[in-house]
Amino acid sequence: MQNSLGQHDRMRIADWPEDDRPREKLLKLGVEALSDAELLAIILRVGTQKLSAIDLARRILQMCDGFRGIDRMDVEQITEIPGIGMAKAAQIKAAIGIGKRLAKQEKPSQHRISCSKDVFDLLHLKYRDLKREVFGVILLTSRNKVMVEKVLFRGTVTESLISMREIAREILNAGAAQVVFIHNHPSGEVSPSQEDVQVTRQLVSACKSIDVHVLDHIIIGDNTYYSFADEGKLHF
């Protein structure tokens, strides 16, 4: 005799016992009681002619190596999975985007940068899985409170890409007293290249010329980071 899970796999979710349906299970027991596949099935809402929503969810998670794998993919890549059209792909990406934004949110009083780990905790979800290098800045008050964080340039971080004039304009327009620069290494390896060192030297020099303190330049990789400040390499 097959167990109840095997029986469920051949049935539409609407035909399952109410307590076993993902949406009803969430309402009754809370999010923590659901598996990744059950959560994704709620986002999908419906499956295909041959697969229930939860079967389709399992297939997606397996093919993409979990939610993080999905996050690395663009909408077009997700639609290459059988049973996933543009609408479902957009729903999935939107749900993951909400989760990432929620993970970054803190109370305003906590938006202060006191060490490199604070920067990593605030931004690693945004930077770690990007397919190409992105360069950004955090603008801060004299008391280390975050004023704004934004991406400035996209592409390999080089002296020719980074416009010191544009960076200075952003800082002066915001009235920032201090800055932290950030960029990612898509390879996941965070050791700075010679180009990274040269760009950092120029950034520090440019900020000194407008009387702005560079707190750090951080390279984000695969769940790790490199801090020029922590390594004592901001003093040129």
Image: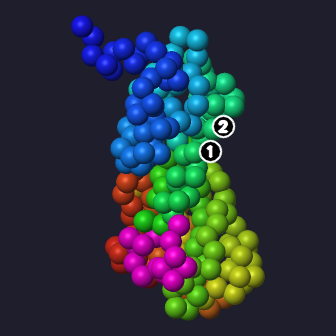
Residue 200 position in % (x across, y down): 52, 71
Question: Mark 1 falls on what kind of element?
Answer: helix
Front-lying residue, 72 or 133: 72
Residue at x 36%, y 44% (from the top left corner): 33
Q: Is residue 21 left or right of residue 141?
A: left
Viewport quadrant of the N terminus: top left
Numbered tag placed on residue 94 in the rendering = 1
> From which residue to which does the magenta span run?
105-119
**How is the rendered protein coloured?**
rainbow
Residue 138 appears in the rendering: yes
Residue 213 position in % (x across, y down): 54, 86
Residue at x 58%, y 52% (from the top left corner): 98
Residue at x 64%, y 66% (from the top left corner): 150
Q: Residues within 10 Å of mark 2 (few under 14, many from 20)?
A: some
The image quarter in which residue 61 lies: top left
In the orientation shown, which residue stands out farthest toward the top? 1
What residue does disc 2 label? 90
Front-lying residue, 49 or 217: 49
Establish if 180 lies above or below 183.
below
Q: Is residue 184 left or right of residue 89?
A: left
Establish if 2 lies above or below 16.
above
Residue 36 position in % (x across, y down): 41, 37
- Marks 2,1: beta carbons within 8 A: yes
The image quarter in which residue 5 lies: top left
Determine if the magenta segment contains residue 141: no
Residue 113 position in % (x across, y down): 47, 79
Determine if the magenta segment contains residue 114: yes
Residue 187 appears in the rendering: no
The amino acid pointed to by label 2 is Ala
